[in-house]
Amino acid sequence: MRVRLATNADCARLPAIERSANRRFAEIGMPDVVGAPVGEAETWEPHCASSHLWVGVDAEDQPFAFLAGGVHGSLMFLYQLAVDHDRQRQGVGRALLQTGEAAARAQGLHEVYLTTFCDVPFNGPYYAGQGYQVVEDPDLPDMLKPVMDAERRRWIAPGRRRCAMRKFV
């Protein structure tokens, strides 16, 4: 497995990767996440153009995972991390996170944020294991406040707590 910057040609494969990654939610009784709309190719092209979209590729250079980020002032926000269902639990997500974090450091940024389901084992606890910590609402950067509001409205249900997490890099 290798991580590289994505090309516009890679963007066409990303919706299928995200759908495959979402299958993990069916295993824990969250079928609505499995069926939720995913970002289409054009969603990810601006991230590609700004060099904030990385893909994990196989031996044939075909993407099977991706990380999309963006710089907002003095921080990087990770919009989406997705690993094909059959490639999960093999260190691919960790490699992509490390690549995004290294890119943030190289740009002189010291904070990387993401949003996630706090209590889903392969979300909040996974990111905590990678060094991310929950950020309480009063401490959220301004750009994340509307993101969190929208996500909480979208995923409202018992046991579906959304949170923002941060890692200092």
Image (spheres, rainbow, N blue to C red):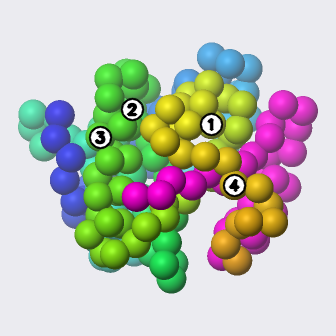
What is the number of the mark on residue 124? Answer: 1
**Image location (x, y in percent) of residue 109:** 40, 72
Disc 2 vs disc 1: which is toward the camera? 1
Compute the Cα span from label 1 to label 3: 17 Å
Q: Residue at x 48, y 78 (%)?
A: 74
Q: Which amino acid does the dot numbered 1 rest on? A: Gly
Residue under numbered circle 3: 95
The residue range painted magenta reads 143-169
What is the number of the mark on residue 84? Answer: 2
Quadrant of the image for the N terminus? top left
Q: Which amino acid does the dot numbered 3 rest on? A: Ala
Compute the Cα span from label 2 to label 4: 28 Å
Disc 3 vs disc 2: which is toward the camera? 3
Residue 102 or residue 64, whichever sits in front: 102
Dot 3 and dot 2 residues touching (CB under 8 Å): no
**Image location (x, y in percent) of residue 10:** 26, 56
Compute the Cα span from label 2 to label 1: 19 Å
Magenta run includes residue 42? no
Q: Residue furthest bottom?
A: 73
Residue under numbered circle 4: 135
Q: Which amino acid does the dot numbered 2 rest on? A: Asp
